[in-house]
Image (cartoon, grey):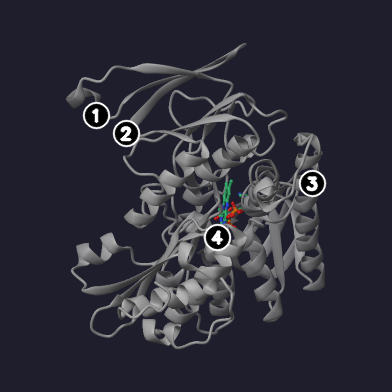
Amino acid sequence: MSDAYDLVVIGGGPAGYVAAIRAAQLGMKTAVVEGRGALGGTCLNVGCIPSKAMLQSSHHYEMADKEFAHHGIDVSGLKVNLKTMLARKDKVVEGLTGGIEMLMKKNKVDYIKGWGKIDAVGKVSVKPLEGKAKAQVLDTANILIATGSEVTPLPGVEIDEKQIVSSTGALALPKVPKTMAVIGAGVIGLELGSVWRRLGSEVTVVEFLDVALPGMDGEVSKHAQRILTKQGLTFKMKTKVTGAKAGKDGVTLTMEPRDAKDSGGKAETLKVDVVLVAIGRRPFTEGLGLKEVGVEVGDRGFIPVDADYQTNVEGIYAIGDVIGGAMLAHKAEDEGVVCAEIMAGQTGHIDYGAIPGIVYTHPEIAAVGKTEEQLKEAGIAYNKGKFPFTANSRARCNDDTDGFVKILADATTDKVLGCHIIGPQAGDLIQEVVNVMEFEGSAEDIARICHGHPGLPESVKEAALGVAGRAIHI
Ligand SMILES: Cc1cc2nc3c(=O)[nH]c(=O)nc-3n(C[C@H](O)[C@H](O)[C@H](O)COP(=O)(O)OP(=O)(O)OC[C@H]3O[C@@H](n4cnc5c(N)ncnc54)[C@H](O)[C@@H]3O)c2cc1C
């Protein structure tokens, strides 16, 4: 069978399905090819959504277990029903992925189930998911690669998704492990480590570097590690995992001090029920036929693109995790919109300096723009305003006062250069600063905007006032 499309998108994750919708809105005849059997990609199926569902459920449990009594609410007989918790998570995923399918129909995008391969410029073949049906060949003016990413493996630690799991397995453990080791103190490791710690696991986080959440503002990542330690996570920093052996009675992890040669530190083992490998994600391009069609692939497997998201081959574009940069769903979605608009002859633009990054632990951690370390390294003079949630009336009412808001502004122009928040609803609070940064606003702009009282956003205003040394409530 042969079809003539304006655009065939390979991959139905946040990058691909959003690009398909926008292209259809702009009048392009569009198809999206997805091989996992459901739309929504990593994000909806095994990433953002199931992890946030589990974070919310486990947070409720922790609140009921540890905080309710303080509010005068006595609870007895509290216990976790993991089966129900996992089923609720699956229902959320099902509802949302089904919703994307409806959106495809609404926008008249053809959803083609199967694995796509680029046979040539303007030709995509699709291997059906089941049966022995012949591959379908799609003719198209443009091809968009949105095939996303996969878990980065760790040599010597073989993932079986039962005892040694990736984030995917960690979102579906059938029982709460007594003990768990998380390899990697990045966003995914800390979020999923928090889930299982809250539900009763003894969790040890093993990290190669000397900081948790590498790349985040130093003051924030230190604070985060301190709070998470207080909550019960154990951190083993500057430690290299050299292997893992799964057996009947658990997994034996072997580790050595990262600087063993210099420090003379000895190798050691850690026996746990479950190991979560969370050292990062890598681009996924397997089976796409990139080499044959001449699409260049960079050193670490990411696909290089120009300012219009076009690869080195005319008519073949790429967006989302597969091109690198911040591997985040909202960055992928924005690229989907902009790329479709560019293909339709419009101009599009993303301000990569104003993409927020959020860690959904409790408290949440959120960041946008430059860190203090980056500003110092670049020799940019800045002023800093910092406001603790202990001085925010709403945080006090909520009994949720860990953390602070920090705003960094140019010393000469007062333009906001970065904001770093650790505290309640940091992921929502950061959006105000993202908006101001998009409009190239100043700290004074935020400080002069009326903020509702009593509200957590007042902390953002106070941090902005603090940039000029005139915070009111501290
Ligand atoms: C546990 C976890 C938690 C996360 N939490 C967050 C979060 O809170 N916020 C956030 O912003 N980001 C989060 N992320 C990252 C986010 O999921 C990704 O950045 C996002 O999904 C990238 O979108 P994408 O469309 O580029 O790729 P993907 O979502 O990976 O989608 C690519 C799709 O392409 C399909 N595909 C690949 N090759 C082919 C082929 N040849 N033919 C057909 N289909 C193909 C795949 O099956 C996949 O469905 C999380 C990730 C994980 C793993």
Give the image location of residue 408, x and y in percent. Answer: 33, 72
Per the rendering, the mark at residue 183 is none
Give the image location of residue 133, x and y in percent. Answer: 80, 43
Tell me the residue that label 4 is attached to. 424
Residue contact at pointers 2 and 3, CB within 8 angstroms: no
SS for tag 3?
Answer: helix
Tell me the residue that label 1 is attached to. 259
Rounded to the nearest angstrom, the CA distance separating label 1 from label 3 is: 44 Å
Say whether residue 442 is visible.
no
Say whether residue 448 is visible.
yes
Give the image location of residue 200, x and y in percent. Answer: 63, 32
Per the rendering, the mark at residue 238 is 2
Quarter holding residue 20: bottom right
Give the image location of residue 399, x and y in percent. Answer: 58, 57
- Quadrant holding the N terminus: bottom right
Does ligand 1 reach within 8 Å of label 2's beta carbon?
no
Q: Residues within 10 Å of mark 4 (few under 14, many from 20)?
A: many
Amino acid marked by disc 1: Asp
